Image (cartoon, rainbow, N blue to C red):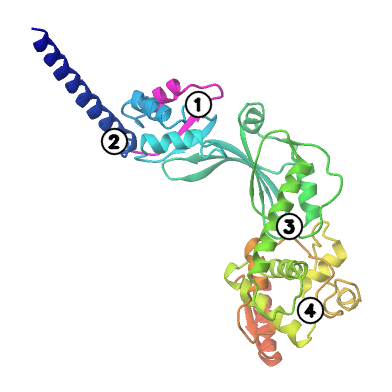
């Protein structure tokens, strides 16, 4: 009798073990397999949320089939206590494992409504935008000048809402003075800016910030990134360039940035200036002259005068040989790369071609023909 009981108990134990093993294998496959979500969604995780509430929300929205499997998997992978608050994009078909990673890794939120402050060369814009998870594109809900007295109500509401996300987007080609002034005028940042950072040393990029972030700390973050970029490109520079230091590469990159807004032209423009430096020809570039007049404090807003082109100033590259003493703007990464890796050309001239780009030439005769075409096009447009 006891032998039968023991035998039955052993059989039952084996059955339980097999069933448990089967459940574990099934649960693991459910945790890592593609999920049931048919269309991407934005998942809001409020501060203080629990894994139970998040898994329930995911189940209601069709992102997970079994909330308990979601929680068990998060616990098994030691991420159950790492839940982060934010607004996160959950892509179509995301597995439980992928969703757990998204909501526990932290960092910048990837979805929902946000306030973006874009600092450009000629203007600054505050924008309230929202990501459409279905298309993966942002839709602008409000856009306005930060100095306007007529602030949209939506912006005011978001400013008063805890957890609102903010980004500062710095465009290529703005001067350090313009950037510092723009940061002084936005209301979601705090702290004083004691002095304007060195010209050229603020990296154009996309910066996630929090409400109340310190302005000086943000500027320091921009400087660190630019220093890293400059060091990186300098290490990969071409041999025998007519620039001897990273600082000179930064100056050249700033001129390239101001001379062309066409990405494909950067290395060609760089080649013109490198060829001129090699041959001892003056750079003769208007943006440096303009910087010498404005000191980077705003836009000139008019054409250059003959007297300004003739004046011998440190930034008048019609009058001086070589590079100006400092950068004339904050160049982006691609202009930095172009400065140390110019295209192999014989170009020594370029002029606007009327399409937003430039016509390049090897000789003065070719250049004069390009200039004549450009002036004819300007005259034609002026008569329209």
- Between marks 2 and 3, how big is the CA–CA gap? 52 Å
> Of callouts 2 and 3, which one flags the residue occurring earlier in the amino acid sequence?
2
Residue situated in front as seen by the camera: 70 or 20: 20
For marks 3 and 1, the one nearer the N-term is: 1
Mark 4 falls on what kind of element? loop
Mark found first going from the N terminus, 1 or 2: 2
Which mark is nearer the camera, 4 or 1?
1
Identify the residue under disc 2. Answer: 29
The disc placed on residue 136 is none
Q: Where 279 falls versus 204 (above or below)?
A: below
Q: Residue at x 12, y 16 (%)?
A: 7
Residue tagged by mark 3? 174
Instruction: Say which residue appears at 36% left-offset and 32% top-offset.
Output: 63
Identify the magenta region.
38-58
- Give the distance between the C-alpha atoms of the residues marked 2 and 4, in whole angstroms: 67 Å
Q: Residues within 10 Å of mark 1 (few under 14, many from 20)?
A: few
Q: Residue at x 42, y 35 (%)?
A: 99
Name the residue tied to disc 4.
284
* C-alpha span from label 4 to label 3: 21 Å
Q: Position of residue 230 (x, y in %)?
A: 69, 62
> Does residue 173 appear to the left or right of 96 in the view shown?
right
Q: Which residue is tagged 1? A: 81
Give the distance between the C-alpha atoms of the residues marked 1 and 2, in whole angstroms. 22 Å
Foreground: 267 or 237?
Answer: 237
């Amino acid at each position: 009798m006891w032998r039968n009981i023991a035998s039955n108990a052993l059989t039952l134990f084996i059955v339980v073990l097999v069933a448990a093993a089967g459940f574990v294998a099934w649960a693991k496959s459910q945790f890592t397999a593609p999920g049931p979500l048919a269309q991407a969604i934005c998942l809001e995780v409020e501060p203080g949320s629990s894994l139970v509430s998040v898994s329930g929300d995911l189940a209601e929205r069709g992102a997970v089939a079994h909330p308990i499997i979601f929680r068990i998997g998060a616990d098994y992978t030691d991420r159950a206590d790492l839940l982060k608050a934010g607004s996160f994009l959950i892509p179509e078909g995301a597995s439980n494992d992928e969703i757990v990673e998204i909501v526990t890794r932290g960092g910048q939120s990837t979805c929902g409504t946000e306030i973006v402050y874009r600092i450009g060369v000629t203007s600054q814009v505050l924008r309230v935008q929202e990501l459409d998870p279905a298309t993966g594109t942002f839709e602008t809900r409000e856009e306005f000048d930060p100095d306007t007295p007529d602030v949209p109500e939506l912006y005011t509401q978001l400013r008063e809402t805890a957890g609102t996300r903010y980004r500062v987007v710095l465009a290529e080609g703005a001067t350090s003075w313009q950037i510092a002034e723009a940061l002084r005028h936005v209301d979601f940042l705090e702290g004083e800016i004691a002095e304007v950072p060195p010209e050229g040393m603020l990296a154009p990029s996309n910066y996630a910030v929090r409400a109340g972030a310190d302005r000086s700390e943000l500027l320091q973050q921009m400087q660190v990134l630019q220093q890293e970029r400059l060091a990186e490109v300098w290490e990969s520079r071409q041999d025998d360039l007519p620039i001897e230091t990273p600082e000179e590469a930064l100056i050249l990159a700033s001129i390239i940035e101001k001379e062309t807004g066409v990405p494909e032209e950067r290395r060609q423009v760089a080649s013109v200036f490198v060829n001129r430096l090699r041959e001892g020809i003056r750079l003769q570039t208007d943006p440096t002259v303009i910087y010498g007049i404005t000191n980077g404090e705003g836009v000139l807003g008019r054409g250059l005068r003959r007297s300004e082109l003739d004046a011998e100033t440190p930034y008048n590259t019609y009058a001086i040989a070589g590079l100006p003493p400092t950068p004339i703007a904050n160049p982006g990464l691609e202009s930095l790369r172009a400065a140390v890796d110019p295209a192999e050309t014989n170009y020594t001239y370029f002029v606007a071609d009327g399409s937003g780009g430039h016509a390049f030439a090897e000789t003065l005769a070719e250049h004069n023909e390009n200039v004549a075409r450009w002036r004819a096009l300007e005259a034609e447009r002026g008569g329209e």
